[in-house]
Image (cartoon, rainbow, N blue to C red):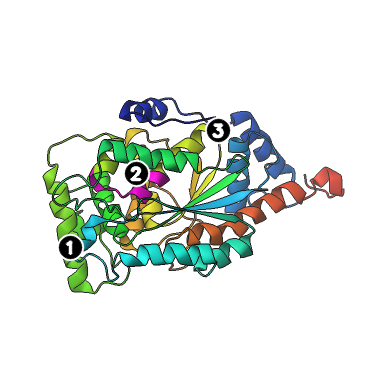
Amino acid sequence: MTVQFQHADDVLDILNNLPLACDTSMKAASDRQGQLTKPPGSLGRLEDLAIWLAGWQGREKPEIRHPRCVIFAGNHGITAKGVSAFPPEVTMQMVANFKAGGAAINQLCQAAGAELDVHALDLDRPTADFTEGPAMTIEDTLAAMQCGADAIPDDADLLMPGEMGIGNTTSAAALALAVMGNTSDRTAIYWTGPGTGLDQAGVTQKAAMVQKAIDRNKGKTLNPVELLSEYGGREVAAIAGLVLAARMRRIPVLLDGYISTAACLPLWHENASALAHCQISHCSKEPGHQHILAGLGLQAILDLGMRLGEGSGAATALPIVKAALAAHNGMATFAEAGVSGG
């Protein structure tokens, strides 16, 4: 299925007509779990993951044969305001490192048996400083979302979007603040963390820039494309596009950390079921991610104190998902094993 994001209304139409998981397959998978040689529920979330995958793959015994991590990279104009401990040149340098196989995500994908794609999005054309105006035009945002949709390989049966972009935790904080609350107890500092390693003074400065960006749009109601245009980066919008296109193709998604999850908040804000085909792979050490998960009512698969990005948490969680399927598909039932109690 080809998903097209030519106009903002296309995104709204898709979000209002999302396909659902297959209830029949989920019930069959759940029934199978009840027949396997173990006490009911004894594999905990592994059982839930298998049933979730069954629903999106539309079969009692789902499989993961072609998992793909897709990294998008973009540069941010907000870095001129001192929101990162690293210069924007690092984005391009890290893209080269990904392509050379030298980054953490390369090793984690290899260990997990996943392929890795890297897409650099106009790195020589940073987004605008979103404290002064929108980070991107609507046209740029839709183009980035389309890049995300088009990056899905034909054979992918599970996706792990990742990102690289100096300054993008500032975008994540702005999106979280815009979507999830700008109240007396949820000000910009609530959503803002150290990112690449800022000290407390740096975090305070970063939060001030986030608040300034939000104040520009005070009183406005923004649709998902407008939210991404105002506060996102190209890599952030690309993740949103990939996740939405994956939903239309019923491909399950493992979201990574703060940026990947925040990129999807505009989708969730429009339709609370928009992320039903997604699992949160890990809980980032970035405080904003922990607050997002609490607000969404979602539990991450892992909590290892990671905050790298790149899709690293998703690649680390992939073996857990594979383990869930190995148990679900490979275990004998009580009847097959001749064990009493089934």
Mark 3 crowdedness (10 Å alpha carbons): few <14, some 14-19, many ≥20: some
Q: How many marks?
A: 3
Q: Most prominent secondary structure in the magenta stretch?
A: helix
Spatial CA distance of label 2 from label 3 is: 20 Å
Q: Which residue is rendered at x = 85% and y = 45% of the image?
A: 336
Camera-nearest label, 2 or 3: 2
Across and down, in percent, residue 244 comes to 44, 37
Which residue is rendered at x = 65% and y = 54% of the image? Answer: 322
- Which residue ends up furthest to the front in the rendered image? 124
Under tag 1, what secondary structure?
helix
- First of labels 1, 3 by sequence position: 3
* Mark 2 lies on residue: 265
Number of the label disc, if any, that sits on residue 21? 3
Magenta residues span 230-239
Instruction: Work out whether residue 152 or residue 19 is closer to the camera in this orientation and state it.
Output: 152
Mark found first going from the N terminus, 2 or 3: 3
**Could you tell me which residue is drawn at 58 percent across and 56 percent down?**
318
- Name the element at disc 2: helix
Residue 275 seen anywhere in this rendered image of the structure: no
Q: Which residue is mark 1?
A: 81
Give yes or no for residue 259 being in the magenta stretch: no
Whether the magenta-drawn stretch holds residue 235 is answered as: yes
Q: Can you say which quadrant of the picture contains the N terminus?
A: top right
Q: CA distance from mark 2 to mark 1?
A: 24 Å
Crowding near the residue tagged with mark 1, few <14, some 14–19, many ≥20 C-alpha atoms within 10 Å: few
Choose top left, top right, bottom left or bottom right for residue 220: top left
CB contact under 8 Å: marks 2 and 3: no
Assess disc 2: are there few (<14), some (14-19) or many (≥20) residues with their C-alpha within 10 Å of its C-alpha: many
